Amino acid sequence: MAKTVCKLLGLVLLIAGICGFFAPTLLGAHLNMAHNMVHIVSGAIALYFGFAGSAGAARGFCLLFGLVYLLLGVCGWFLGTGAEHMFNIPNATSPLLMLGKMDHIIHILLGVVFLAGGALGGSDS
């Protein structure tokens, strides 16, 4: 199950990262260069574990990334301000990442699916 989740979500993250360059408000998210690169790198790593990693490594990746994405979504939701729950991760000159309500919801969903894939990792090869 973990390898399958890595393959599917890796592809989704990779596509979202590429599409974000052309549609910065894809699914209501707030995508910029840094956000897209995070999705592309996350997707590439997930694809690696899905196709080339062992089942145990894919399970560990799912648990780790599930926790990271879930915490990012929950913390962003509660630390964000205003109706959009906007949460900015600052950079020297401008926000490095701007995360709003849809970003938080998407990150929570990604976290839950990754965690489920890790928890139900099984012995797929």
Image (cartoon, rainbow, N blue to C red):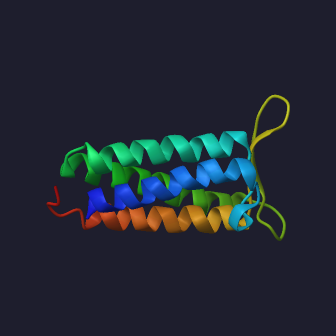
Quarter of the rendering containing residue 102: bottom right
Q: How many marks?
A: 0
| Residue 110 rendering spot, x and y as whole percentages | 49, 63
Is residue 71 among what the camera can see?
yes
From the viewer's perspective, tell me whether residue 4 is left or right of residue 124. right
| Residue 105 rendering spot, x and y as whole percentages | 62, 68
From the viewer's perspective, tell me whether residue 120 is left or right of residue 114. left
From the viewer's perspective, tell me whether residue 123 is left or right of residue 87. left
Quarter of the rendering containing residue 63: bottom left
Residue lying at 20% horizontally and 50% vertically, measured from the top left: 56
Residue 40 lies, with reference to residue 26, above or below; the image says above
Furthest-top residue in this view: 92
| Residue 119 rendering spot, x and y as whole percentages | 28, 65
Residue 52 lies, with reference to residue 1, above or below; the image says above
Quarter of the rendering occupied by the C terminus: bottom left
Residue lying at 34% horizontally and 68% vertically, measured from the top left: 116
From the viewer's perspective, tell me whether residue 57 is left or right of residue 18. left
Towards the viewer: 3 or 87: 3
Is residue 98 among what the camera can see?
no
| Residue 55 rendering spot, x and y as whole percentages | 20, 52
Quarter of the rendering occupied by the N terminus: bottom left
Residue lying at 65% horizontally and 53% vertically, measured from the top left: 19
Residue lying at 71% horizontally and 47% vertically, measured from the top left: 21
Towards the viewer: 36 or 96: 36
